[in-house]
Amino acid sequence: MAPRYTSTAYLLWLIGGWTGSHHFYLGRHLQGVIWVTTGNMLGMGWLRDVVRIPDYVRSVNADAQHERYMMKYIQLTKVPPINGSHVMAMAMLGTWYYYVVIGMSLFIFPTEYNAVSYVAGSLAMSVGVWAAGSCGRASCSLNHISFTVIAIHSCFSSLRFAALLITLPAAILAAVWTRRWRFEYDGVLSFYAAIVTLVIIGAFTNAFAYFAICWAHDTGLIWQDINGRTILNRELLYKQLVAGLNALIEGLNNLQPPHFIFDFFAFDGNINVFFKPMWIKAGVWWQKFH
């Protein structure tokens, strides 16, 4: 790879940072895909890169002093250390991918195939947690994370949208448990793999947009007046948002582990004794003000 320059990286960060162009330039293709699909982690990642770009450039150029430092650091730590920023990134990315993919899938697949949407969301959450834990020199196992998420989600599928409260911590634990060093600075994704990934995401997004527009027309959420102007039915939009929040609260009210867990541990208990009063109060508050 030809040498990369800090000035060029900063220029790309400034004029096209929201597209992750500076990460693609520095060979950090996985992080570039994350930046495109999350809006630079809602802008926070763009600000963080201000201080991180010089280190990225030294890594990709295999600066001798930097490499000696990294090899010594890897030998001392054995496994990549985990801190609050790593956990927060995994949680944010996993949550974002989970709800976005489920929301988009519910428009694409028929109602009788809603289970497919939740499986797609669970896999997307696995990818999000894995991606956040595999940038730079560290990596974690996507297979282990996906297996953990699918297994846990299948046990708590009755929670619907609220299943994230159980599956996300399990996914993060799996990522931390399998986190390892990569001794060479080689991207997890090649440039062509990143392009193919973005094309697939783009196709999925276009399919969602088509079905979402059809749904909005069929339900009367948007309509055209006699002058051909598109009008948004704000009252119906508000009702749809309330219905979605009520579905989330309903999932929280069902917060109860499957019976085989209690049978296995010979424990005749109910986790709702601790949690359900809180969900009931939240539901009563919501109904009171809406």
Image (cartoon, rainbow, N blue to C red):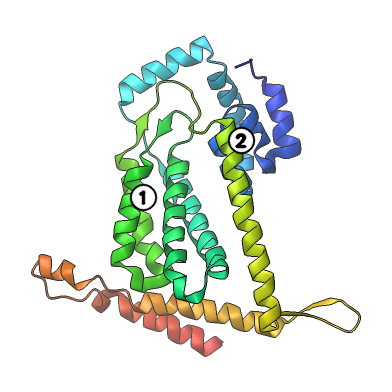
Please tell me whether residue 2 is drawn above or below residue 31 in the rendered image: above
- Answer few, some or many: residues within 10 Å of disc 2's Cα (few below 14, many 20 plus, some between 14 and 19): some
Query: Is residue 40 among what the camera can see?
Result: no
- Answer few, some or many: residues within 10 Å of disc 1's Cα (few below 14, many 20 plus, some between 14 and 19): many
In the image: residue 265, left or right of residue 4: left
Q: Residue 176 at what x, y percent from top left?
A: 33, 42
Secondary structure type for disc 2:
helix
Taking the spot 47% from the left edge, 48% from the top edge, the residue there is 128
Please tell me whether residue 284 is drawn above or below residue 117 in the rendered image: below
Please tell me whether residue 194 is drawn above or below residue 120 in the rendered image: above
For residue 146, the mark is: 1
Mark 2 to mark 1: distance in Å? 29 Å
Mark 2 highlights which residue? 49
Taking the spot 69% from the left edge, 85% from the top edge, the residue there is 235
**Sequence-wise, which precedes: disc 2 or disc 1?**
2
In the image: residue 20, left or right of residue 231: left
Please tell me whether residue 166 is drawn above or below residue 216 in the rendered image: above
In the image: residue 262, left or right of residue 207: left
In the image: residue 209, left or right of residue 190: right
Taking the spot 27% from the left edge, 74% from the top edge, the residue there is 256
Taking the spot 73% from the left edge, 38% from the top edge, the residue there is 16
Q: Residue 7 at what x, y percent from top left?
A: 71, 23
- Foreground pick, 63 / 263: 263
Q: Residue 120 at what x, y percent from top left?
A: 46, 59
Secondary structure type for disc 1:
helix
